[in-house]
Image (cartoon, rainbow, N blue to C red):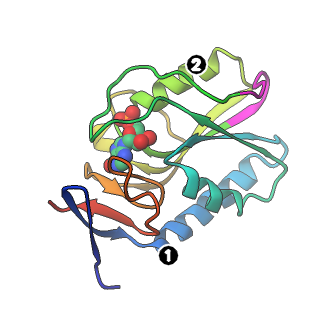
Amino acid sequence: MDPRTVKLHDCEFSTYIFEEEIIARVNMLAEQINKEYEHKQPLFLAVLNGSFMFTADLMKRISIPCEISFIRLASYQDMQSTGKVKEILGLSEDIHSRHVVVLEDIVDTGHTVHGLLQQLKERKPASVEVATLLLKPDCLQHPLDVKYVARSIPNDFVVGYGLDYNGLGRNLRDIYKIIS
Ligand code: IMP
């Protein structure tokens, strides 16, 4: 497929992972989760805003009994992670003794997921795992065990398929990476 570029604010981005590849990888994750959670009635916690497209495409392929709920954390500013533990907003479910799967758009330094997991574990779920669309393994600053990863990428800033650059780019159906 021909590369396409988009300009968002002051930066130029070029197509990087096309929708077809994303969907194929989401399919594989869904098959794995369907097998591993067959009798566990998992509770999926999707972290807004970035995970909304990933969550929709993944959940359409989850065929076992499950629940889905949406949570928010403090928003991500510019291109750097702050490292602060963010408050969980919107978690109305009792997760005690539940099998929880957190759905994330991207794990970069891992600060966000690390802080989130700490807070979730205090509520004594039966288990808690993370499923992320993207992982930047070179950037990880925590010994995180991210069980479900659709795609690992190098340390590039990416947008599209739910991911944004200062609010723009979430609606793009492919994933783009920054070129300038
Ligand atoms: P972490 O706490 O450094 O792992 O960052 C996680 C959050 O930072 C993600 O949920 C995204 O909102 C944001 N983020 C990290 N890398 C990128 C990127 O390449 N593009 C867009 N957002 C990103």
Please indicate whether residue 2 sits to the left or right of residue 133 in the image.
Answer: left
Residue 20 drawn at (x, y percent) = 49, 75
Q: Which residues are magenta?
A: 92-100
Label placed on residue 20 = 1
- Could you classify mark 1 by the number of other residues whose Cα lies within 10 Å: few (under 14), some (14-19), or many (20 or more)? few
Residue 63 drawn at (x, y percent) = 79, 59
What residue lies at 50% left-to-right and 39% top-to-bottom?
146
What residue lies at 78% left-to-right and 29% top-to-bottom?
98
Q: Quadrant of residue 58?
A: bottom right
| Image quarter (top left, top right, bottom left or bottom right) of the N terminus | bottom left
Please indicate whether residue 175 sits to the left or right of residue 54 in the image.
Answer: left
| Residue 49 shown in magenta | no
**Residue type, label 1:** Glu
Q: Circle 2 sits on which residue?
A: 119
What residue lies at 53% left-to-right and 21% top-to-bottom?
87
- Could you classify mark 2 by the number of other residues whose Cα lies within 10 Å: few (under 14), some (14-19), or many (20 or more)? some
Residue 32 drawn at (x, y percent) = 66, 55
| Residue 93 shown in magenta | yes
Chief SS of the magenta region: loop
Q: Is mark 2 within 8 Å of ligand 1?
A: no
- Disc 2 + disc 1, Cβ < 8 Å: no
* Front in this rendered view, residue 149 or 115: 115
Ligand 1 picture quarter: top left
* Front in this rendered view, residue 86 or 138: 86
Q: Secondary structure at mark 1?
A: helix
**Residue type, label 2:** Gln
Q: CA distance from mark 2 to mark 1?
A: 35 Å
- Which of marks 1 and 2 precedes in the sequence? 1
Label placed on residue 180 = none
Tell me, yes or no, if residue 136 can be seen here: no
Tell me, yes or no, if residue 75 can be seen here: yes
| Image quarter (top left, top right, bottom left or bottom right) of the C terminus | bottom left
